Amino acid sequence: MATYPELCMIINGEKVGVEHRRTQAIVNPATEEVIGQLPLADSADLDRALATAKKGFQIWRDSTPAMRSRVLLDAARLMEERGDELAAIASMEMGKPFAEARIEVHMNAGLFEFYAGECHRIYGRSLVRPRGQRSTVVKVPVGPVAAFSPWNFPIGNPGRKLGAPIAAGCSVIMKSAEEAPASGVAVLQCLLDAGLPPEVAQAVYGVPDEVSRHLVASPIIKKLSFTGSTVVGKHLVKLCAEDMKRTTMELGGHGPVLVFEDADINHVLDVMVPHKFRNSGQVCVSSTRFLVHESLHEAFVAEFAKRAAAWRVGNGLDPNTQMGPMAHERGLQNITRLVNDAVSHGAKLHTGGHRVGDRGWFFAPTVLSNVPLGSEIMNTEPFGPVALINSFSTYEEAIEEANRLPYGLAAYAWTNDNKRKQNLGIDIEAGMVGLNTVMIAGPDSPFCGLKWSGHGAESGPEGLEACLVTKSIHEI
Ligand code: NAD
């Protein structure tokens, strides 16, 4: 098994260590042991990264699609080769089961492979004009991108922040999560080892608000790509508005799951229970508000609770573990508070609802039913292993509850009625809708939210498009 690496930033291809800098302790959430000290960027580091990104853009915007494609393909291969090491690092710094982290590596390699192909397909158009005149519409890379991502997918999030901009010909300054920094650096290292010029992509860490203010204020940065909570996303959009900088915002969610009376509940539970407890529920597209037809509700709750109570919680590096700890202590405190609040409002607790053990930030898989709409957990993203299971009687009632919140990231529904499926796709206000499936994301499809869940997209041709700007050029 891999050992946890010495932590660093990567600026202009060089490893930048602690030296004189402020540091942040990195803690393994399964053991509460300090496993590393992360150097935090000062303003001189950020200025150096900015100057490098400017140079990197001049180099990379003139690269050929074939060059970009080769780097992405080789990086994908390196990721697969280093997959076990990367997965172990991710598990050590944020707690997820090794097997989940290994899938994340594989999916990220798939994203790089997709963009290795897609970068050949950046087209403009030529307009019909009289002889001697020419008008063309071209797509060019937007420029140096600042990209900030959270800890919940320590490999996948940095991969998304880097893949499309590099395919488009942009340079990137990435600040992946301070809570899971070695994973972000390891992803970047695959690209650098695959031949990406060191000026093109860099990794910095720091005090998040300091870093974002510094980078966004610089005229060198032309776009901000952020994945994280809605509250921080709104703050960053305001910062960007000052200079009209482009933004892609992948923000929070509160995913509804509609289970209609014709669904096979055993099959639904086979899919939804693992989905609920994946990554300890710390997933933006997690299934959060289950809305089950009243004819199935009681049986659904009972079986969900039975399966949840048997779910194996432990250290992510133990192959028997199905669910790791919360990634940080504040997550554990938050989920405990939200469950207590729901119960005090009258929700029924069927299983869980408490910390597991007294070392490591483990929280028991939890099932609540009949959760009042006024309780906080029905309105804010819980980001924890809690299933909220309420009932409905009519289609209209289910849609109204599904759309009640200002979030619109992922939604799921289970029914065998084709007409109803078609209507659900239209009626549910979410960027991604899974009908009889939870497979809503892939390298070739846009990952995107509506309403408070953000704007723009990552993955798919849409993710590449978001790193390009359109120019209209006219000649005589
Ligand atoms: P958060 O917004 O507090 O932090 C997310 C990341 O942004 C962290 O790395 C943090 O250090 C950084 N950050 C915080 N303030 C910042 C600032 N002012 N400038 C720059 N960076 C800043 O959220 P969190 O609770 O740590 O992460 C979970 C949230 O992320 C959830 O709301 C989840 O839904 C969301 N998320 C969304 C997606 C998506 O694609 N829509 C994917 C994963 C996570």
Image (cartoon, rainbow, N blue to C red):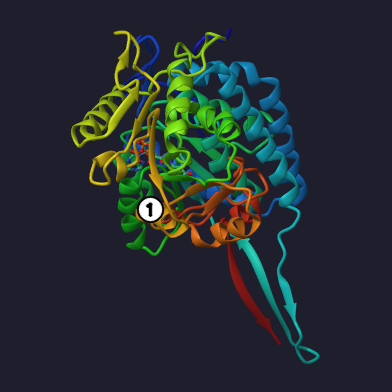
Tell which of 237 and 70 is nearer to you: 237
The amino acid at mark 1 is Glu
**Disc 1 CB within 8 Å of nearest ligand 1 atom:** no
Picture quadrant where residue 388 is located: top left
Quarter holding the C terminus?
A: bottom right
- Residue 363 in view of the camera: yes
Q: How far from the left and from the top, in percent, is residue 333?
A: 25, 25
Q: How far from the left and from the top, in percent, is residue 123?
A: 72, 64
Tell which of 447 and 265 is nearer to you: 265
Q: Residue furthest right?
A: 131
Name the residue at 46% across, 35% down: 283
Tell which of 46 and 276 is nearer to you: 276
Image quadrant of ligand 1 equals: top left
- Residue 108 sits above or below residue 50 on the image: above
Tell which of 132 and 228 is nearer to you: 228
Q: How far from the left and from the top, in percent, is residue 465?
A: 61, 59
Disc tally is 1
Crowding near the residue tagged with mark 1, few <14, some 14–19, many ≥20 C-alpha atoms within 10 Å? some
Name the residue at 53% across, 8% down: 318
Picture quadrant where residue 137 is located: bottom right
Name the residue at 47% across, 57% down: 395
The residue at which mark 1 appears reads as: 401
- Residue 314 sits above or below residue 326 on the image: above
Q: Is residue 435 left or right of residue 75?
A: left
Q: How far from the left and from the top, in percent, is residue 117?
A: 75, 47
- Residue 7 in view of the camera: no
Callout 1 secondary element: helix
- Residue 418 sits above or below residue 104 on the image: below
Quarter holding the N terminus?
A: top right
Q: Residue furthest bottom?
A: 130
Name the residue at 50% across, 27% down: 278
